[in-house]
Amino acid sequence: MTPSPAEAAADLIITGCAVLVHDDQERIGFEENAAIVVRGGAVESVTTADAVRDRAAVERVDAAGQVALPGLVNCHTHAPMVALRGVAEDLPTEEWFNDVVWPIESNLTEKDVALGARLACAEMIRGGVTCFADHYFSMDAVAAVVDECGMRAHLGEAFFSSQGPEGRERSAEFALRHRGGAGGRITTALAPHAPYTVDDADLTATAELAREHGLPVHLHASENRDQAEAGLARHGVTPIEVLRRTGILDTDVLIAHGTGILDRDLPVLRDATGRVAVATAPRGYLKFAWPTTTPVRALHDLGIPVGLATDGAASNNSLDVWESMALTALIQKSTTGDPRWLTSRQALHHATLQSARAIGLGDTLGTLAPGRRADIILVDLTGPHTQPIHDLAATLVHSARSSDVRTTIVDGRILMRDRELLTIDVPAVVREMDERMPALLDRSHGKRIQEYDT
């Protein structure tokens, strides 16, 4: 006789924790003294600790004093750029690109990209990020690192029109070759860089490829107000309007940043026939002294998901999505002049279900419920900085830190347990990266991969 699911041995049982759950109205709540049962890489059930006391399991985790959350999603980053953390500091955007970052990136080798991706994945796993959307170069190397380390990723090979048609073709070939890779943990996208570096013809061709192959698009657009105003002054259209006229908004598209989205862009986004999402990375906007931030409230009113992101560590210095969650909540209160927006529960919704939706995985990630992939993090709230707990959501958003993440699980596999990384040797990565630094940082050649001139 085949045992019932309630009798069969589980792969993993997590017990004794509080569990963040969504109700049928997608409101966030918490179940206390709960348990999560995992089988086949998915959540089988969220139940009580008493209900699984005698249930057989290959592995058990006692999570007393901890909170289980869906793994965080970094909805837009350039993971290998951790190699450039701190290299270009206290500079305006144009100088940051033209004088430092794009000259250095002309030196990149596939080895540099692999080392950067490996270090970035270690940082994200330790910070409770289980999935990241990456937009960079030499992405075969990033895909290999994702496969090795056990994370989940949404990957796109970036291209500029200055590369000729070969750039666009490489992006499409990468997306088709790696779609469904790493045992299904890799999804892919076409990745034109931005409307100011990719011309209308290439954007139109990208939209056609996206529709033909059922691929989404991930790109930067209206990153800041200067880009929007430059587009209007030079061409009479905003970057968002360029996306409409080239057909990009007829595809499923993830727009990075959008701090330059204007009021005239909102109906354009509302009327898009594809699924539109925006990724916000607030720390970088503060660092560059941009005068506006992602219009989260206006996008919310249109039903457009806004996912949390960090951008690359060269501009953000960190891949800490926990910090992005807190900053998003605080900056929204400041910019709207309303302390009731965003609430802690709304911020947690952005960090979980909305971030999953932003990268097209809202049906499989973002909430701990039966059938969802078992991407789970356990957060320790026993430290003095998180005690006492009067409002669990507020404690998570405004008191907890990424270093409070004790355990990180992807597809039911434990990648970090009690702060110990199990799939990446960080000291070895750092040693190799240090050896590469002189060649990577050399700017004496006078080259750059692109010109920033919005």
Image (tube, rainbow, N blue to C red):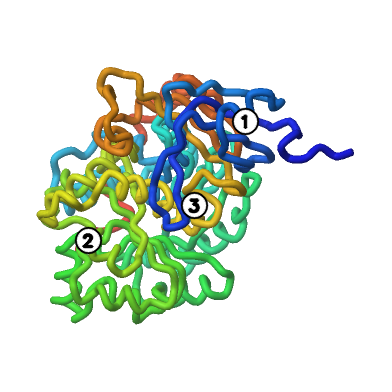
Amino acid type of the residue tagged 1 in the rendering = Ala
Element on which disc 3 rests: strand
Amino acid type, mark 2: Pro
State the image coordinates of residue 54 (x, y, percent, origin top left): 68, 23
* Residue identified by numbered label 1: 51
Q: Secondary structure at mark 1?
A: helix
Number of residues whose C-alpha sits closer than 10 Å to that of mark 2, classed few (under 14), some (14–19) or many (20 or more)? many
Which residue is farthest right?
1
Left or right side of 203 for 393 = left
Query: Who is closer to the viewer here, 56 or 292?
Result: 56
Q: For the point 44% across and 24% down, which residue is it?
A: 406
Where residue 60 sits, quadrant-wise, is top right
Q: Residue, x 43% and y 69% (percent of image)?
A: 275
User: In whole angstroms, how far apart are the C-alphas of marks 2 and 1?
Assistant: 44 Å
Q: Which residue is mark 2?
A: 295
Q: Which residue is mark 3?
A: 155
Disc 2/disc 3 C-alpha distance (Å): 25 Å
Q: Is residue 58 left or right of residue 312?
A: right
Label number found at residue 42 = none
Location of the C terminus (image quadrant)? bottom left
